Image (cartoon, rainbow, N blue to C red):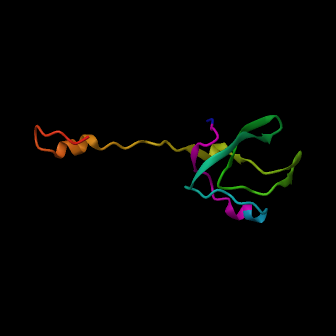
């Protein structure tokens, strides 16, 4: 699944708040909605990478990690896109009007 900057997502992964706090980081809350700030990759094993994101609402401090000092990425597999649907109830309000009367535009 690919994400883009500015996209709204929902965190569906495990609760990692205690583990993240022990390292001085903030983790996303299960069921919470966020906005994608950056899109990249995270190495999960030698030669294997997965999609990763950073969030506007969570900015963690840079930390020493394999290959340098940087803000950690969040694995994108724990996020789902939020689909925005525009609600239009005009068809239902028209059903309430007497036969032959048109709704005001």
- Up the image or down, 44 lies above or below 26; here it is above
- Say whether residue 58 is left or right of residue 43: left
* Rendered residue at 89%/45% (across/down): 67
Tell me which corner region of the image, top left, top right, bottom left or bottom right, holds residue 48: top right
Question: Which quadrant holds residue 89?
Answer: top left
Image location of residue 34, percent across then percent down: 59, 51
Q: Is residue 18 left or right of residue 83?
A: right
Q: Is residue 31 magenta?
A: no
Nearest the camera: 48 or 27? Answer: 27
The outermost residue toward the right is 67
Q: Which residue is at a point 66% across and 43% down the rendered structure image? A: 76
Picture mark count: 0
Q: Position of residue 102 (x, y in %)?
A: 17, 39
Q: Which residue: 64% across, 43% down?
A: 77
Residue 52 visible somewhere in the drawing: no
Residue closest to the eye, 42 or 100:
100
Whether 17 is among the magenta residues is yes
Kindly identify the residue that appears in the image at 63 percent across and 55 percent down.
14
Residue 38, given in percent of the width and then of the height, sits at 70, 43
Quadrant containing the C terminus in the rendered view:
top left
Spot occupied by residue 95 in the image (x, y as percentages of width and height): 18, 42
Residue range in magenta is 3-20
Res. 83 visible in picture: yes
């Amino acid at each position: 699944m690919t994400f883009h900057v500015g996209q709204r997502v929902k965190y569906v992964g495990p609760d990692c708040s205690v583990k993240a706090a022990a390292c001085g980081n903030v983790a996303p809350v299960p069921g919470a909605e966020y906005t994608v700030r950056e899109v990249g990759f995270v190495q999960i094993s030698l030669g294997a990478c997965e999609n990763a994101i950073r969030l506007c609402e969570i900015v963690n401090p840079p930390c020493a990690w394999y290959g340098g000092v940087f803000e950690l990425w969040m694995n994108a597999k724990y996020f789902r896109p939020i689909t925005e649907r525009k609600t239009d109830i005009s068809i239902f309000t028209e059903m309430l009007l007497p036969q032959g009367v048109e709704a005001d535009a």
